[in-house]
Amino acid sequence: MAHFTKATSVKDWLDQRLAVNKLEKVMMSEYWIPKNINFLWAMGMVLVITFVLLVVSGIFLLMYYVPTTAEAFNSVNYTIMREVDFGWLWRHVHGVAASVVFLIIYIHMFTGIYYGSYKKGRELIWISGMLLFITFSAEAFSGYMLPWGQMSYWAGMVITNLFSGGSLHADGLVEWIRGDYVPAQAFLGRFFMLHVLLLPLAIMGLIGLHFGALRIPHVNNQDGEEIDFDKESKKYLDGDKAGSKVMRFANDFMSKDMMVVGIFLIFFFYLVFYNYGFAMDPVNFDPADGLKTPTHIYPEWYFLWSYEILRPFNIDLGLVLFGFAQVIFVLLPFLDRSPNTCAANRRGKAFSIWFWLMLVNMIVLTAMGKLPPEGIFSTIGLVAAIVFVVQWLALPIITSMEKKV
Amino acid sequence: MKNKEPLILAVVIFFTLVTYYLVEPYAHHVMHKHVESEHFAYADLPAITKTGNAENGKELVTNAGCTGCHSIDVAGMPAPMDAVMAAQSYGVNPPDLSNVGVILDAKFLADLIKNPAHALNVEHKFDVSKGQMHPMVPFYGMGGDIDQEIADMVAYLQSIAISPDEVTPAMAFENACGRCHAVGYEKWTQIGTKPAFKHEKDGLAFDIKVMEYQDSLKAYMGKLPPDLSMYIRSRNEHFISTLVENPQNHLAGTAMPRVGVTAESMDKIIEHMENAGDTKRHEREAIGKNVMIYIVIFAIFALLWKKQVWRDLH
Ligand code: HEM
């Protein structure tokens, strides 16, 4: 058995048993961060904080939510919104956080693409990140079912219908997912379970993996420079803090993280109290009614771009391209054949255009996904969807022609 | 190297705002028809040209048979039948007339008495030439000048009504909308507020009466008018008030009548719907302000901490 001595302090007592000093070094004080990064590198921390807000507000909501088709709507809109002290606050925090988390995820993703942070040893960070994106999407979708409003019901109907696979007519699969012919009690029950248990567990596990994947390659920097972390950290520890190219995660970078988090929270709570409508669709304040199809059925804004890739085509092609859009981002580290790890704008014209076009085109797809598919909107949607696919097919070609910079 | 962070922030904000604009204000603008408010002017209805005499009006209201269908509680005139029976006869319970003089517009009342289907804007459903009579019979006159008689009745209805600032939000709603729309979250049913019953049996008996009423209403309207508990969130204030002003502007061919409320009554009706579906709005504003102050202070401290920590790093 290991040798234990009388502890000199609580910390020492813990250290002997849990190696907290070592742990603190590995994860905080001697987790080295390059200095050459900007506030976009704080988005990860903003995501952590938003996830915490989601979990905490979700726990409060869970105390009063009733997962039955008869009671769900009223348990949310009457019990939580009217009866429970501050129930409305937790609900608005949860709803707004669920929407804002995707805004930050998209900023975080595009930051990664822009600076090439998925390359040279950072592939697993990217892949675990995309797995987080996918589980977050499932989490958001399942959560959207819970108030059992009109949009819950009809979005649930439309999205589960996709699993029939178009001409494959796999209606059995759709029924298996729903546990019924239409979304009903079995459907609500299982999405409730997914939303409050299985998916949050998966997300927490994936966040662990994401962080683990970061530890050895370290985060990238604005110039994609390869830093000798041993040398630079030695310099720092020897007292040349200003001359070293790196800094500690805690408190050095964490203080900046917190500054960005502070500014983010101003924005966040402004939305919670004064501009929450975008995150809580009005249509979902009508109780679910299987006999009354809403005039416009659309998903939440963060799913619109992929929805628009599905919509302009016939159902089979649409589904294939939709599937393509879901997985293609995961493969980015392998589709990008360029030897360069640096800002997109410096990698030469081709990739620079590719990056900005991808960003603008996804915004176009997002807008068209919400607008009714008529006239000019469906033409724009079709073109944008084709551009999206072509861009991904072209990526390996243009990046393999890229010159080393 | 020059600090690029302001530029990066500007780029992030720019793309965020463009996306927001496209999926929110712009998309809603395209998806929802915009209906301008007519400020409850009821410009299509003729103005009242005669000065009414409430004394004469009192007699006319009784003689014209209004109280054959309506109660006037303040004048001690009870309803001829209970709500369920009335709905079986007329499709809907004719409302009590005690306060219609203040809640409804005078021009509207005058036109309603003369030609209910016209004032209520449901002539597409009630076409006399096809023998479709509105359940409220028009007033054909008592032999004198019909416009004078109507002005007298309107004057009477106004004279018995409470003063405008005594009208509570609930009163305005129950008078103008309550015969068709339930508000479950305020315990309102089409036949009145559901009391707290000691015995479950009595509660169930009440529920059965409500259902019977709703059956008649459904037959009259073609569908059950929705429970409006959460409509202040599922629609918005502008939609609801322009809908009430003239339902046909939003839902062409709908069975919901124009009820002819005044602009002030509409504000009260909205307030009632907010009390039902956005109960905590005052608390939200008050707490919102405090949270914002707290968070700004937090951000300032975070900024100062960062400055202090980073002093040695450059
Ligand atoms: C809620 C989910 C997520 C959390 C909590 C999270 C958290 C973090 C944190 C704390 C960092 C380090 C600090 C930073 O660079 O921002 C990071 C880095 C990174 N994340 Fe995420 N992340 C999430 C989702 C994603 C997604 C969806 C992607 C995209 C596929 C992604 C890709 C990356 C990449 C590439 C890095 C490395 C950045 C670099 O090396 O410069 N993450 N993440």
Image: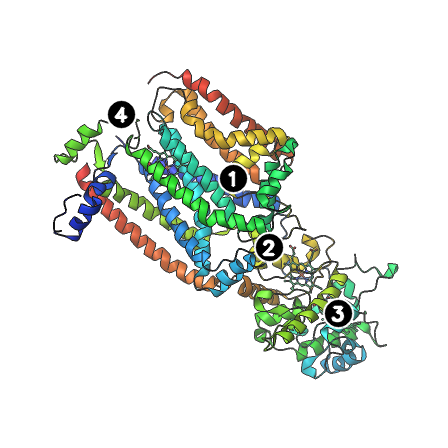
- Three-letter amino acid code at the position of disc 1: Phe
Between the residue at mark 3 and the residue at mark 2, the CA separation in whole angstroms equals: 27 Å
Image quarter of the N terminus of chain A:
top left
As drawn, B61 above or below A148: below
Q: Earlier in the sequence, mark 4 or mark 1?
A: 4
Residue identified by numbered label 2: A286
The image shows residue A132 at horizontal and vertical percentages of 42, 38
Residue A175 appears left or right of B8: right
Q: Between residues A111 and A232, which one lies in front from this camera angle? A: A232
Number of numbered discs on residues: 4
Determine which of the numbered discs, if any, sits on residue A303 in the image: 1
Residue identified by numbered label 4: A226
| Disc 1 + disc 2, Cβ < 8 Å | no
Q: Residue at x 23, y 47 (%)?
A: B305
Residue A281 in view here: no
- Three-letter amino acid code at the position of disc 3: Ala
Q: Secondary structure at mark 2?
A: loop
Q: Quadrant of residue B212?
A: bottom right
| Disc 2 + disc 4, Cβ < 8 Å | no
Residue identified by numbered label 3: B87
Q: Residue at x 49, y 61 (%)?
A: A81
Between the residue at mark 3 and the residue at mark 1, the CA separation in whole angstroms equals: 47 Å
The image shows residue A230 at horizontal and vertical percentages of 19, 29
